[in-house]
Image (tube, grey):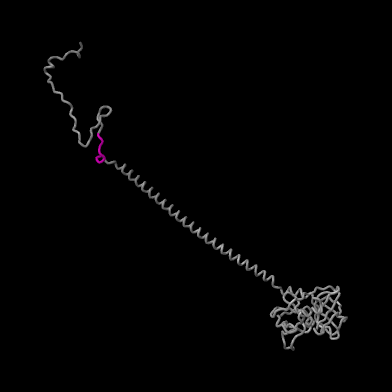
Amino acid sequence: MSELDAPLAPSYRASAPMLPVSPPTMPPLSPDRPPTDPGEDGSEEAPTEDLASAPAPPPASRERSRSLAQSRSRGLALALALALVAVAGGAWSLQRSDQALRRADQAALELQSSRREVAVLEERIAGLEAEAASRPDPAATAARVRQSVFTVISSTGRGSAWVAGAEDGRSLLVTNFHVIGPDAGPGTAVSVVREELRVEGEVIRVDEGRDLAVVAVSEPLVALPIAGELPQVGDPVFVVGSPLGLEQSVVGGIVSALRDDHLQISAPLNPGNSGGPVVDARGQVIGVAVLKVGDESTEAIGLAIPAAEVCTVVAC
């Protein structure tokens, strides 16, 4: 038997007092705290301490928290400022867009109004152009008439004559009877001159009562049209002839009055105008200049034989 297996010595049993064994005492449970559960190793978990009784964080941690909070505040403020700027920019853009749209609408209305005005002006211009085209050109009228007006020269003097038509292949010119002389009759020789053109002709017909005579020439000449009706008082007139021997002279005036057998005109007449044509603004013959009324002190009172009388001596 080993020493460990040996029974205790009697002396030891006798001398060693026996102590009672009592269970371990547990701290009393707080009524506000639940009992802790033992840990996995059998030990009890440390009770969770209340936040109010938790120790304060160290100063460095508080500084970091404060810096983080400030950074978040600054970020929120910046984001808010950017949002406000974006809203303000959007509002400004909308306002500018609205203004641009209003300006565009106004411009469209003004353009439409301008187009209407242009259309009205174009219509008026077209009307004026048509009216102007219908109005005779005095210069053009005078140029057409002059090519048919000649100076007639007889043994007793000279005057004016104009081409009224053609007959038997010859051109017929009308003048006053008193221009070719009181003794002239059919077969009387006369000359007709216009600038460089000189043609010999003969009297073929006379009407002493109407103071008219007809001269025929072999040269083909351009005839003037004869008006089919009387003019109105106030109508413009032109007289073409050779006053005082001045060939191709043109004077103007108006129809002053319609007398019994004559037209009174305001165009000045002088010796040499007798026998020349009195034409309207279109170049149609309305009469034959015959004489000036009054003396040397009288102005702008002339008489013309109506064109209808011409048709008695030539075919109209």
Q: Is residue 217 visible?
A: yes
Is 208 placed left or right of 22 in the picture? right
Is 125 placed left or right of 26 in the picture? right
> Which residues, given as a range, are shown in magenta?
47-54
273 or 312: nearer the viewer:
312
Task: Tell me what residue is drawn at x 36 percent, y 46 percent.
Answer: 72
Does 49 appear in magenta? yes
Occupied quadrant, residue 123: bottom right
* Quadrant location of the C terminus in the rendered image: bottom right
Does 299 appear in magenta? no
Position of residue 156 measured from the top left corner of the image (x, y, whole percent):
84, 85
Task: Check the image and name the residue furthest to the left.
Answer: 14
Above or below residue 174? Residue 21 is above
Task: Check the image and name the residue furthest to the right.
Answer: 187
Chief SS of the magenta region? loop
Position of residue 124 measured from the top left corner of the image (x, y, whole percent):
63, 68
Q: Is residue 246 visible?
A: no
